[in-house]
Amino acid sequence: MTGLPALSAADGRVHARYWLETGDDPERTAAVIAGEQSSGTFTAVPGETPALKERSGARVERVHVLGRVGTPSLPTRQRAASYTQCVLDLSWPLANFGVSLPNLMATVAGNLFELRQVSGLRLLDLAVPQAFVDGCPGPAFGIAGTRALAGVARGPLVGTIVKPSVGLSPAETAETVRALVAGGIDFIKDDELQADGPHCPFDERVRAVMAVVREAAERTGRKPMVAFNLTGEVDEMRRRHDLVLMQGGTCVMVSLNSVGLTGLLALRRHSQLPIHAHRNGWGYLNRCPALGWDFAPWQTLWRLAGADHLHVNGLANKFSESDESVIAAARAVLAPLSARNPMAAMPVFSSGQTGLQAAPTYAALGTTDLIHAAGGGILGHPGGIAAGVAAMRQAWQAAVAGVPLTTHATAHAELAQALEVW
Amino acid sequence: MTGLPALSAADGRVHARYWLETGDDPERTAAVIAGEQSSGTFTAVPGETPALKERSGARVERVHVLGRVGTPSLPTRQRAASYTQCVLDLSWPLANFGVSLPNLMATVAGNLFELRQVSGLRLLDLAVPQAFVDGCPGPAFGIAGTRALAGVARGPLVGTIVKPSVGLSPAETAETVRALVAGGIDFIKDDELQADGPHCPFDERVRAVMAVVREAAERTGRKPMVAFNLTGEVDEMRRRHDLVLMQGGTCVMVSLNSVGLTGLLALRRHSQLPIHAHRNGWGYLNRCPALGWDFAPWQTLWRLAGADHLHVNGLANKFSESDESVIAAARAVLAPLSARNPMAAMPVFSSGQTGLQAAPTYAALGTTDLIHAAGGGILGHPGGIAAGVAAMRQAWQAAVAGVPLTTHATAHAELAQALEVW
């Protein structure tokens, strides 16, 4: 955001970058935050010796002033004539918490957002050293494993979400899946609202859907990937995972903010399937510019914990997120966490998507290592689902070839028809 | 906030109340949110029949307009001439998700904060029906169980936090605890930054500290409660809990935002000790008035999941939170979740606390069912720790008796001395 050098954890410490606004002197506020989040507290403590501070203190690596404003971004009891906005880089010795994602979180995103000196604080970036990366499970399948299981060697996985989100019976869900599978789709997911309610119990839904999927796989030689939402308590998730696996399923889905880091870690340690990670609730972490989380540090934690696929919204989406933010999120998900252990996950694009988003998405990312989920963009095709899926693939072929959609459509009937409705 | 009737789940549905700001017609936005969070989506879906909507749709129970503003509270791509602020009540049939805390969370706090029609959204309150309350574990010890284990029949538990937060060795931690225990303190907790780093491994710390605590208990017949921070992965937390139990410990502590609902649930299902729940990170969920969470609905989820103690900051604290907000949080923690199954937790007051906060805290709550943690308020006493603890107790006796501190101090030397430094 500022031309500052990217964070690096090459010194073996954990580094975090924040956007900070303070009515106090920014260097002093930086020192308070560093103290609060390591060996210090509001007042001097007898046991906080220089040796202890040297060993365990957080270090202020950078305070880069961006400017000043007259009004605080967040309500504050500490009024000032002006408020300084700056970039703050902090670092911690790994020994303060060890290789532990939950304790890393309490350190870099704990009791600092509500400090009285702070009228705005946002975690912009996070860099963890090689030893931390290597000690985390990370995605077990990632891009290559997902492609292998879905039988999609190149191009994006073309996907969709079962709708209505909630309310269908297991048999109705299976019928919906039957039509999608017959149309040649690569990927199907539950809505995040569909879990294990009494009208559509998880077990029955999995059995009914997988009967359809297995039948299709036997016929076509390719098994579409279905992400079953197993969000629940740890033992429930493990049991549901085992059922999906036994039924021949190839993916499980979980709502990250509902289960937490420890829930995802427990699932990852148990799972023999890719984990499709849903970020619902992300808005409350992200949408106030002066508070919370950028996507880059947030997704780092979940990839370290084992997410194989991560939702990033989509270009021209129906939410409030800008295209720029969507692309930054997707790039973050694909960026290596370390050279030796990149742990890339597959970005999942969704929300109001059609083939029209193929070219700009590809232009921004330079890869097709992604899941592109469309609802109306596929189901709304006048020729039916198979034609809708074909049109999505044709749009991606055009994007990769650098050919305008209208040109490509002259030789591809499904795409031509789709362009009338997209 | 508005004189509206309190939420009730007496109809067996889950009810949530939001503060909503929208540039669109509020009734239409309410319908969009209700649709998005249940059977609907952005566009009509073939399978969304009237019968399905009746069965599974969320219901708009109330749209109460508060006023209009000219500028959106959050950045939005959907500009309007004015933005309406209102209270929105929604309800869902329990059957959409069943008795599942993680899936309840995805429903009431999922993909709605970033809807394009929304320029502000905050979850104000949550009411879950009796069947949901009864199906959740809730606190296993709560107030009575905590008092019994700590040997404190009446008055608040007077507590403190081991400082420096991080950097002490196990032996140094035990020496700190030795002094506190000798001073007659009721409750000691780890800082949330102190978990299981290589300089202070959890196991060694517990063994060293509990040797001191057991020795004191044998001498005095009362065992101070020590909350060991076992935040970590599920299996780590279970193993650490077992060690604390075996060593005669009486409490474990966990960082809620670090482990997530599923982590707390797993710990609760396993635990034979009270769970001290730390809310670090709460600031990023709460501090933007137009976004995120009020404390009332948030603490409801964690109490249902099994938190016995919940942090609420303290009056005249060193953070940005107002006294009004602190008291509202403490009242929420003490309020019954249902008449049959109240699941009250113990509020934990901390941050810059001394005996000066006893009277206003008691006046606001009318109970001493709480933990009052002070650092300098105890350690800074000129007569030492024992005098500091005595002064805290004397301040609470005065508060309960309705006697001014200065009056009470005439017959209580430790309080009199404390009043010179508090």
Image (tube, coloured by chain):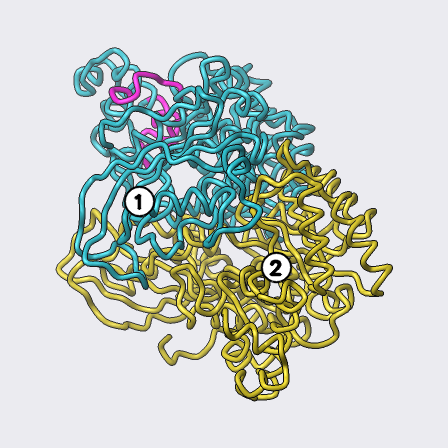
Chain colours: A cyan, B yellow
Disc number placed over residue B116 in the picture, else none: none
For this view, does B140 lie left or right of residue B355?
right
Residue A139's spot in the image, x, y percent? 54, 24
Q: Residue at x 75, y 40 (%)?
A: B239
User: Looking at numbered disc 2 in the image, what kind of residue is underneath it?
Assistant: Thr
Identified by mark 1, the residue type is Leu
Instruction: Write down the chain letter for disc 2.
Output: B
User: Magenta span covers which residues?
Assistant: A362-390
Compared with residue B224, is residue A168 higher up or lower down, i.e. above or below?
above
Circle 2 SS class: strand
- The residue singled out by tag 2 in the image is B160
Q: Relative to the observer, which residue lies in front, B270 or B353?
A: B353
The label on residue A20 is 1
Instruction: Check if mark 1's residue and mark 2's residue have beta carbons within 8 Å.
Output: no
Q: Residue furthest right?
A: B218
**Toward the viewer: A96 or B292?**
A96
Q: In the rendering, at what x and y percent does residue A182 appear?
A: 47, 26
Within the image, what quadrant is residue B123 found in? bottom left
Viewer-proximal residue among A195 and A81: A81
